[in-house]
Amino acid sequence: MTQASLIDGKAFSADLRGRIATHVARLKEEHGITPGLAVVLVGEDPASQVYVRSKGKQTVEAGMASFEHKLPADTSEETLLAKVRELNEDPAVHGILVQLPLPKHLDSDLVINSIDVAKDVDGFHISNVGLLATGQKSLVPCTPLGCIMMLKAELGDLSGKEAVVIGRSNIVGKPMAQLLLAESCTVTIAHSRTADLAGTVRRADIVVAAVGRPQMVPGEWIKPGATVIDVGINRVPKEDGEGHRLVGDVDFASAKEVAGAITPVPGGVGPMTIACLLSNTLTACCRANGIPEPEL
Amino acid sequence: MTQASLIDGKAFSADLRGRIATHVARLKEEHGITPGLAVVLVGEDPASQVYVRSKGKQTVEAGMASFEHKLPADTSEETLLAKVRELNEDPAVHGILVQLPLPKHLDSDLVINSIDVAKDVDGFHISNVGLLATGQKSLVPCTPLGCIMMLKAELGDLSGKEAVVIGRSNIVGKPMAQLLLAESCTVTIAHSRTADLAGTVRRADIVVAAVGRPQMVPGEWIKPGATVIDVGINRVPKEDGEGHRLVGDVDFASAKEVAGAITPVPGGVGPMTIACLLSNTLTACCRANGIPEPEL
């Protein structure tokens, strides 16, 4: 049996960031504009600190301005909302991201919905959700945006393909379904209550797994030749009991024997997320300045 | 072969309107509040005039206050927006509906999105779309709301059922899919680009047809025992060539031989739409006054 081709998210995201950097350089040269991304981090969550550092680094590498705002864990809602307001009004800031999760005393929905819709580069504002759901111009959540970019690069036209999304979260599963529908796939959303998950997955030309359960999708559920996008990043103990390794929601070893193409974990969807954040920031900057958006 | 049971939308909607009227009477008695629905009609479209008249009549019959605002076809956007603002601020108005379609010189999206989200009883405001898409408390578009009410009344718990929605419009197909997903169905959205529509429909426990093509779904596509909700209302010439009759998107004659239950056209989904508009107005009124929403 031939093995699936690997969809190399690391290489794809490096390419994408390269194209973004080219556009950013042109924006500076032709229009004197530098896209700016502001990241707000409340508290000291170690994982969040790592993410924010990576985001800042990649933002600068793409030639954009990075603004980091670190607030103490006991920041009041009022103070945080005032910070968002300040960034909404700052013309040097084209994208605003409030790193989640927020400390428990803060209302995430309220804070996210206080971000200017046009600067909401995470795509979590309720208006961006509504715009995406009605097929209008919006800012799209980064992870599903990365998935659809890879799918289009791999398969070209997606129209008429059977797509199955496993998982119905607001940040991946549901927007992913919207994006696949916008590409005219026949879209099924499956989840923990799905009666025949194996049978459902087996009819898919495109499988997007986004449940957060390690290796729950075995190769025998995959239709031969299907394209498999694995959004899961799960830490499991190593076989030898020493330390951990990362695995996806798909059992990679068995799936790669059946699929036509598959994203590995790590090195698949993961690296695309920050690249798409930069892409959204560039898009927001172009829209704010009435400049045609680049095709990325 | 046993024939499908009929899902009688006319009786169901009469029941629903009765329950609404009971709640309205109680609101008046216990809280001194009368729910109010304002309908804005721009121009003289004959079909729209008929709808608006029916809405007004049923609103009053349910014990609610009905406010009709008829504006000339050449009304400026500014004037229409001012009217919406006035209704947004009017405490006697709990629901606002701007009758669509608007004359071409008016921007429907702009007008709809100027309605107070909490008074948007059509559920078309982009924030209500986003709230529904993320599973939050929203006002739900009337036609899909009516469909899900009938499905729950017919089938009870929908969890784990295979549902196929044919059609991906913003006013029926997409919100219908969200509602079925919220009930934990495994949901597939099919449409004109679906490769194997017959096969897709054939696996469904629940079929919702919302495409606007007369009798396009034949009985042989229906899984025996499935529940069929036909949203289509299409005018076709009568067999004898004299006048017209109404048919759905489903071929009723053949489908009723296979389905477990089916909505007729007319008399199925149609009568539910205005009843759900009244239900939304009651819901909006209760929320505005901090009164628990009735289970309808």
Image (spheres, coloured by chain):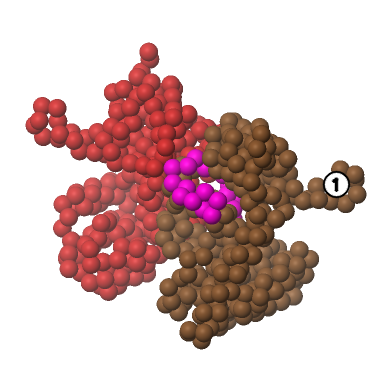
Chain colours: A red, B brown
Q: Is residue A217 left or right of residue B266?
A: left
Q: Which of A136/B266 is in front? A: B266
The range drawn in magenta is B151-173
Give the image location of residue A60, x and y in percent: 27, 50
Question: Quick check: A20 above or below B296?
Answer: above
Q: Residue beneath label 1, please?
A: B238
| Residue extending furthest toward the left | A242
| Res. B25 image quadrant | bottom right
Amino acid at dot 1: Lys
Question: Quick check: B228 above or below B152?
Answer: above
Q: Is residue A234 magenta?
A: no
Q: Which of B117/B207 is in front? A: B207
Q: Which of B274/B49 is in front? A: B274
Give the image location of residue B71, x and y in percent: 71, 76
Q: Residue at x 54, y 34 (%)?
A: B203
| Res. B108 image quadrant | bottom right
* Crowd band around label 1 with a 10 angstrom C-alpha radius: few (<14), some (14–19), many (20+): few
Give the image location of residue A74, x and y in percent: 17, 68
Q: Which quarter of the rendering shows the N terminus of chain B?
A: top right
Q: Residue at x 73, y 44 (%)?
A: B214
Disc 1, SS: loop
